[in-house]
Structures are given as C-alpha cells and as structure tokens.
C-alpha cells in the first residue's frame, strides 16, 4: 500500500513538473516573438534598424531650433517628427514609401554614429539668430563626414539664404567636395507671385526624370568646382550641384526646399511639380 501510494505520488509530481516546464517554455517563446516583432516594426528614430533597409539620417545637431509651445520649449524646423509647414514629415513618408528607414542624429557626426547611415542630411545649419548656442561645423567634423562619404555615403547639404543660415563654417564641409554656398539671396518671392520662385528643369536631367519645374523660394546660389557639377540652374546663377567623392555622392542646394509647405500643393499652384521632383530626388538618392 505504501509503495503504491509512493509511486502514485511520484507520477503526480512528475506530471506537474512537466506541465510547469511546458508553460515556462511557451511563455518565453511568446515573449521572445513579441519583442522581436515590435523591434522590427516600431523602431524609434535613431535606434537600430531592421537588416536590409537603407537608413536616412537627418541632422539635429547643426540644425537644432526650438520654439515655445504651450509654455514649453519644443524642437522644430526640418525634422522628421515635425508635421507643421516647416517640417520634413512628408519627406520622411516619401523615403519610407521607397523602403528606407528614418533616423535622427542629435550629436556631432562621428565615424561610429554615421556607419549605419546610407544617407546623411544636414539642413539649414544654425546661426546665432536661430539658436542661443549654435553647433558650428568644424574642420574635424568636416573631415569625419568627408571620410564617410569617401567610403560610400550619400551626403545632402541644404543651405538657406544668407540671413537665415550659417554659411561660412558650413562651407568648410561643402568645399571639400568643390561646392560653395554663396552669401546671397536668390529667388525672392513676393506673395502671391509664385512665378518668381520657378526654376525650369532641363530635359534629360540625371536627378529629376519626371518633373519639369520646381518652386524654390529665398535661396543662396551655389558655385561648383571639380569634382562637383551643376545639375540645375537659372539663366543667372547655379541652383543645385552634385559631386562624386571616392565611393560616395554629395548633393547640394542652398535651401531646405521640400519641407511640408512646398513638397505638394498645400500652398503651391498646380503648375509646380515639387511633388514629382521630390519623388524623383528620393529615388535618385536611394540609388546612389
């Protein structure tokens, strides 16, 4: 009787032991799957990106503006998260639609924090008017970025007209590729005369293959020397330039350009094709 009771108790203990092990295994598996799925589909900007996707890194160090909102200082102006007229949220959507992932770099560029980026965009570097303590371009920063381009990176440099952007120090970087942002103010537009900001696109343009014209307002012109070449110009000045540098590519324009206000037709008359030009440009960048 005692032996029978002992054997029965032993079987019962073993049964519950195996049930407990099974539950632990199932729970661990479900938790692991859930974590993996979330990690791949809901990566915040600046986090590690799913394998195979090109990362488009947007600077938030040289351009680091704040505005007051509901009594608090908040970041704004040319950011992926900014859905206002001056934000890049719609441009970010375009990159995502082409399979790219977005990231934001809030620190100075280094070899380590640039190594995962396929494209690095610097737009409208701050001057003292825009930010109390601007982070200016330096020779060391410029060398770091140039080395990254030489190794195959795609760099986008967006300036602005000379009154709304720091250009002297920004040129430390751009001139490594033969590009100079000039301290002028072109395509000045008096609303509602949008035609004053129209730039015609030449046939066979290597970047803009479907758009026929673009609207660009209040820019600085560029000067291109080897290895850079002008890819868009008016009869009076050069607007956009591209440089091949080592294994990489540099695109330059003296304006932040396709922010939310002017990427589509929210404000623009139907005759302008910024939406087509933006799509052409995004595809071209991702192919470099």
Image (cartoon, rainbow, N blue to C red):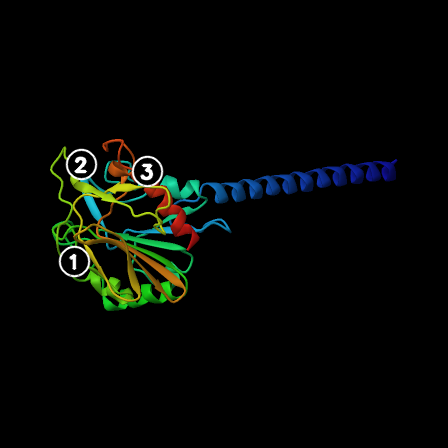
Rendered location of residue 46, percent (x, y): 38, 50
Do labels 2 and 3 touch, CB within 8 Å?
no
Secondary structure category for the residue under label 1: loop
Classify the position of the N terminus by image quarter: top right
> Nearer the N terminus, badge 2 or badge 3?
2
> Nearer the N terminus, badge 3 or badge 1?
1
Q: Which mark is residue 153?
A: none
Do labels 3 and 1 touch, CB within 8 Å?
no
Classify the position of the C terminus by image quarter: bottom left
Residue with the mark numbered 1: 182
Residue at (33% x, 47% y) in the render: 203
Using the rendered image of the protein, determine whether residue 77 is visible from the camera's viewpoint.
no
Residue 109 picture quarter: bottom left
Rendered location of residue 221, percent (x, y): 18, 54
Q: Nearer the viewer, residue 255 or 208?
A: 208
Decide: few, some or many residues near mark 2? Use Cα within 10 Å; few <14, some 14-19, many ≥20: some
Residue 1 position (above or below residue 171): above
Rendered location of residue 99, percent (x, y): 46, 44
Marks 2 and 3, how far apart at CA = 16 Å
Marks 3 and 1, how far apart at CA = 27 Å
Residue at (35% x, 67% y) in the render: 147
Residue 193 picture quarter: top left
Residue with the mark numbered 2: 194
> Nearer the N terminus, badge 2 or badge 1?
1
Marks 2 and 1, how far apart at CA = 23 Å
Decide: few, some or many residues near mark 3? Use Cα within 10 Å; few <14, some 14-19, many ≥20: some
- Foreground: disc 2 or disc 1: 2
Rendered location of residue 235, percent (x, y): 19, 51
Residue with the mark numbered 3: 275
Residue 145 picture quarter: bottom left
Residue at (79% x, 40% y) in the render: 10
Q: Nearer the viewer, residue 251 or 69?
A: 251
């Amino acid at each position: 009787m005692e032996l029978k009771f002992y054997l029965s108790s032993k079987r019962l203990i073993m049964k519950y032991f195996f049930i407990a092990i099974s539950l632990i295994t199932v729970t661990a598996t479900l938790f692991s799957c859930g974590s993996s799925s979330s990690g791949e589909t809901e990566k915040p900007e600046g986090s590690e990106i799913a394998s195979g996707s090109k990362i488009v890194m947007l600077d938030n160090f040289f351009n680091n503006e704040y505005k007051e909102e509901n009594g608090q200082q908040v970041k704004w102006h040319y950011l992926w998260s900014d859905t206002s007229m001056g934000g890049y949220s719609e441009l970010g959507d375009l990159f995502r639609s082409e399979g790219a992932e977005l990231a934001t770099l809030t620190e100075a560029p280094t070899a380590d924090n640039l190594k995962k980026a396929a494209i690095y965009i610097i737009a409208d570097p701050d001057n003292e008017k825009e930010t109390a303590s601007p982070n200016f371009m330096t020779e060391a920063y410029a060398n770091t970025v140039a080395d990254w381009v030489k190794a195959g990176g795609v760099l986008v440099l967006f300036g602005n007209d000379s009154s709304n952007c720091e250009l002297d120090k920004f040129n430390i970087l751009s001139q490594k590729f033969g590009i100079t942002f000039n301290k002028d103010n072109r395509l000045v537009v008096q609303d509602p005369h949008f035609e004053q900001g129209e730039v015609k696109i030449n046939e066979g343009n290597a970047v803009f293959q479907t758009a026929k014209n673009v609207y660009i307002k209040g820019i600085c012109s560029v000067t291109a020397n080897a290895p850079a070449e002008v890819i868009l110009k008016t009869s009076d000045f050069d607007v956009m330039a591209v440089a091949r540098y080592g294994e990489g590519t540099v695109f330059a324009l003296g304006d932040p350009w396709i922010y939310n206000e002017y990427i589509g037709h929210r404000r623009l008359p139907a005759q302008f094709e910024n939406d087509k030009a933006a799509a052409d440009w995004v595809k071209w960048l991702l192919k470099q």
